[in-house]
Amino acid sequence: MRHSKETREQAVARMRAGDAPLLEIAREFSVSTNTLRAWLRESEARARALDSARRVATSLSREKYTSASQRQRLLMHALEQSPATIIVTDADGRIVYANPKFVATTGYRVDEALGQTPRLLKSGETSAEEYRRLWKTIKTGKEWRGVFHNRRKDGSLYWERASISPVHDAKGKITHFMAVKEDITAFMEAEAARRRTAAGFTAVFAALPFAIVLVDAAGQVVIANQAAEQLFCAAMPRGMRFDALNLLWVDAAGVALPVADHPLMRMLGEASDPSGVQMRIGVAPPKGGTRWLRCFARPLAMPETHEVAALLVLTEDCDDRK
């Protein structure tokens, strides 16, 4: 005989209540005591399964909540430990958050910055027009990137590369702006020093009284000083082919020297002497009149590419032979 679910549940409920002997309950439902015990075991198994399911569901729910909280903690930790300065402002540009790197970089405490605008850091070197372009960009929902020369609390100046972007709410409205800034003072100072060194080198190079020409592996002029241009009576812009100069070269015996045999061109060959060569050479510019020169040529490796180039140094020869 097959018993309904309701009948089994009623019998199990009677057994759990304990208000009657097992044999009496068996007679009431017309089953054996073994069947009653089986129903009870099945019921307990279902109860355990339901209880386990509830625990899993609760655990998953808590896990989701914990994961969200964990993500928030991780994000906050990332902001706090970031090597970049991070500032968050409201839609009106008032600072509502600044991370510890902001304090280390600017010298301002967080409580001094809250409620202020980033104008707190202005040095006066960024034009009003640039600030207008910045605000126009981020107000339209776009990211702005640029460089500021700002002022710390102690008055010292520093450079920072900034990325400023809007933060939208669920409806797409701009509620905040976030600025991520990198202190590039060391880089900018190094670059300024490099430019000063380059400018100094250029000034000295231009003032040298003897001619200097550097030619790359393709036979093109890399650099030539003013003395070289005066000697050859021709401008020598970068990229100009050295053999395109309208010059007549002669060797020490006064015999015409093909451009291919010129010591500078020979330095570009694979078998060139790394120590260089020195020789007496004559050059006749378009205006005429051979000038005798002491020529020193040597190969060298170009920076970064390490391609072979040739350096030519020419000075007036004081020999009496003309």
Image (tube, rainbow, N blue to C red):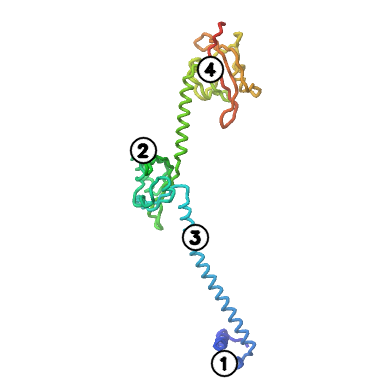
Q: Position of residue 251 (x, y in %)?
A: 60, 11
Element marked by disc 4:
loop
Q: Of 306 and 102, which appears nearest the observer?
A: 102
Where is residue 46, by image quadrant?
Answer: bottom right
Dot in front, 2 or 1? 2
Reading the chain from its start, which is encountered first: label 2 or label 1? 1
* Residue in the picture at 36% in, 38% down: 125
* Residue that label 1 marks: 20
| Distance from the alpha carbon under mark 2 to that under mark 4 | 47 Å
Q: Of 277 and 190, which appears nearest the observer?
A: 190
* On screen, residue 112 above or below 303: below
Q: Position of residue 64 (x, y in %)?
A: 50, 64
* Residue that label 4 marks: 245
* Residue that label 3 marks: 70
Where is residue 19, by image quadrant?
Answer: bottom right
Disc 4 marks which amino acid? Leu
Q: How crowded is mark 2: few (under 14 residues within 10 Å), some or many (20 or more)?
A: few
Dot in front, 4 or 3? 3
Reading the chain from its start, which is encountered first: label 3 or label 2? 3
* Residue that label 2 marks: 125
| Distance from the alpha carbon under mark 1 to that under mark 4 | 123 Å
Q: Position of residue 145 (x, y in %)?
A: 42, 43
Q: Quadrant of the N terminus?
A: bottom right
Element marked by disc 2:
loop
Q: In this view, does 224 lie to the left or right of 140?
A: right
